[in-house]
Image (cartoon, rainbow, N blue to C red):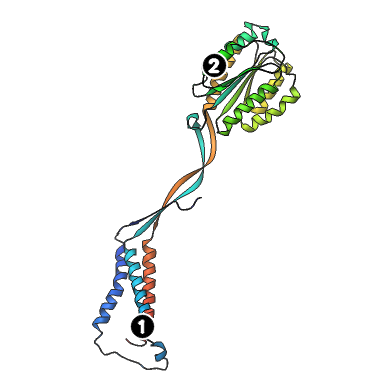
Amino acid sequence: MRGVRELELSLTIGVHNLVAALALAAPLAGLALRRRLAGSPPVRVSYPLARLLQPTSARRGRLRGAVLAAALATLAVGLLSPTATVEREVTVQASGEVQAAHQVARPAVILAIDVSGSMGEQIPGGVKIGAAKEAALRFVDGIPGGVDVGIIAFSERVESSVPPTGNRSELEAAIEGLRATGGTMYSYPLMSALAWVRGYRAFNATCAVVMLTDGLPADRSEYRHLLSSFRELEVPIHTVFIGRAGSEGEEETRLIARETGGTHHTVTTVQDLLDTLSNLSSRVSETVTTARFSASVKVPVRTQLDLGWPMIVAGIALYGAYWALAQREEGTRL
């Protein structure tokens, strides 16, 4: 909670002020009665301590007058029922769903495509690389315009890449240029994807990675330590394996999805691949454009304080002090 940001005073007059008005009138009535009776002969009583209780001086008179003035002023202001409005910031927990449009940065999706030599092989319905290109084009086309998309083509290295962008023409040109060549390693595409998503996550933008492959990587022991970084950043990797269920390659891609919170899919035909990438496009789009959040939010709170009654009480207390001083100065005079 932060300190007072704003203080507003307002004066109002209410029905309840009648009681306070009587308190204000009391000292005035007392003064009027005192003056009216000033001509009456005083009654004096002598006793041993009378002189000690009846010292009069100009200083005491001024003090008594000051106390009376303070009492009357305090009661007069209290009668106007002043209020103070104090604005403060308090921290509350907020949770719910926020749309990507309200985030600092746009969401991002990265499509990593295996273009190793084995992707040039046949599967039912066509050639793997040709099916991957068509599926990738459909995938990009299905991502909403408010989401950046990046492409990484990899073999035993990164063959080509397009950092996350909203330029769909650039992405389509990169996909059309894919060629099958080389071996299979996961370290380099995952490091590239990790470098890209870090920047987006720094601005709290949601991200996801889709990885399409048909092989068993040669760097299994090297790339796995990267998965913990994706998990810490809350960036899931959805894997699509082209090949036989139960193979080592499928188990490896299933592990990637499990370790990062993504989903795993195994396809064996061109049609399966096209359908899977189309479905993933819709699912990933829904995930990155609607994010669940829980955070502390500072909200302004305005509190109105009634200053009228405290001032009236203070005025009555001051008048009591004035009365005590008057009795002390006047000794036994009635």
Q: Is residue 299 above or below residue 46?
A: above
Residue occupying the point 33% across, 91% down: 44
Sequence-wise, the earlier of marks 1 and 2 is: 1
Q: Nearer the viewer, residue 247 or 175?
A: 175
Question: Tags 1 and 2 in contact by the CB under 8 Å rule?
Answer: no
Which label sits on residue 11?
none
Which label sits on residue 170?
2
Q: Quadrant of the C terminus?
A: bottom left
Q: Nearer the viewer, residue 175 or 326?
A: 175
Where residue 263 sits, quadrant-wise, is top right
Q: Is residue 28 visible?
A: yes
Q: What is the three-letter code of the residue carrying label 2?
A: Glu
Q: Please, what secondary structure does the residue beneath circle 1 have?
A: helix
Q: Nearer the viewer, residue 172 or 80?
A: 172
Query: What is the number of callouts on the image?
Result: 2
Residue 152 position in % (x across, y down)? 62, 19
185 sits to left or right of 81 = right
Residue 161 position in % (x across, y down)? 61, 19
Q: Is residue 262 visible?
A: no
Q: Is residue 19 above or below residue 284?
A: below
To which residue does mark 1 refer?
58
Q: What is the three-letter code of the residue carrying label 1?
A: Ala
